[in-house]
Amino acid sequence: IVDWIRDNNSKIDWSLYLFTDPDIIPEGSDICAHVQEAIKGGCTVVQLRKKTNDTGLFIEKAKKLPEITRVYNVLLLIMTPFDVALAPGADGIHVGQDDMDLKDVGIAGHADYFGLSPIWNTNTKKLTKPLIGTMGTRTILSYVKENAGYEILCVAIGGFKDYNIQCLIFQGRTGAKSVSGIAIVSAIMASTTPYDAAKSLLTSIKIPAPFI
Ligand code: TZP
């Protein structure tokens, strides 16, 4: 990702990471207003995703997002393809696993985080791989910590609601390393009350770990 993220990654709060699928917001909602409410409710990072074939319309709808994320001091990442990735002025790029090889992206060195999915079942994306769950997450995080050769953060994705976040975070804490954040699509984007949805999810993320 961009140099700024690399230099400041330890200060970035990845806790509640919103993937903004514009197709599932409630009818009549404006994507920018929806995301703004979610940020006010506690989202700490926003990723803009193109899920429509109309690139022009997508950029038009999204062009206010960088202003909003900057006001709230929230990181804005944009997903490949690159025809739209840099258009609205993002802080960084999210490279989809099937989009391109990381070495072709032109990023010096390595990625700053990786998304781990699917943790739980989800209707938002057609799944082609088995669910990872809590123990799978723990195993993968331990493996990555030992083998990556550099510090890389993990954000967990897939099927998160406020009631199933804590068991993943708790399991991670008991292992070698916990995830740095939880990425959400439908629990916020499909909600008619994105502020409340984000607040409730963040509350679940922040529950202190019990002593064990
Ligand atoms: N990648 C793996 S699962 C998924 C993505 C983008 C969708 C997660 O959506 P939701 O609605 O939070 O389950």
Image (cartoon, grey):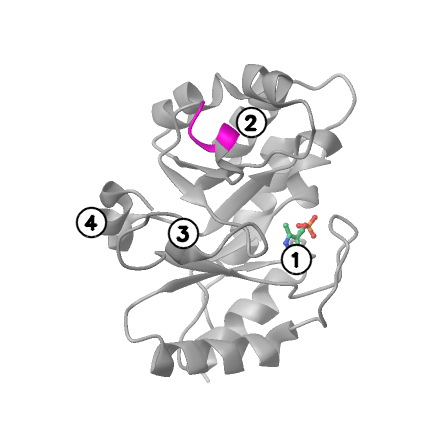
Say few, some or many: other residues with alpha carbon within 10 Å of mark 3 (under 14 / 14 to 19 / 20 or more). few
Helix, strand or loop for the magenta stretch, by majority:
helix
Name the residue beneath numbered marker 3.
104
Quadrant in which residue 175 is drawn: bottom left
Disc with the residue nearer the chain's start (2 vs 1): 2
Disc with the residue nearer the chain's start (1 vs 3): 3
- Which amino acid lies under the numbered mark 1 shown in the image of this protein? Gly
Please tell me which residue is depicted at 64% across the width and 66% down the height of the picture.
119
The spot of residue 6 in percent (x, y) is: 25, 50
- Left or right: residue 90 versus residue 132 is left
Name the residue beneath numbered marker 1.
158
Find out whether the residues at labels 2 and 1 contact each other: C-beta distance under 8 Å. no
- Left or right: residue 119 versus residue 199 is right
Confirm whether the magenta stretch covers residue 144. Answer: no
- Which amino acid lies under the numbered mark 2 shown in the image of this protein? Glu
Confirm whether the magenta stretch covers residue 85. Answer: yes
- Whether residue 192 can be seen here: no
Query: Mark 1, mark 3: which one is toward the viewer?
Result: 3
Residue 174 against residue 18 in the figure, above or below:
below
Residue numbers of the magenta segment: 83-87
Name the residue beneath numbered marker 4.
7
Disc with the residue nearer the chain's start (4 vs 1): 4
Name the residue beneath numbered marker 2.
37
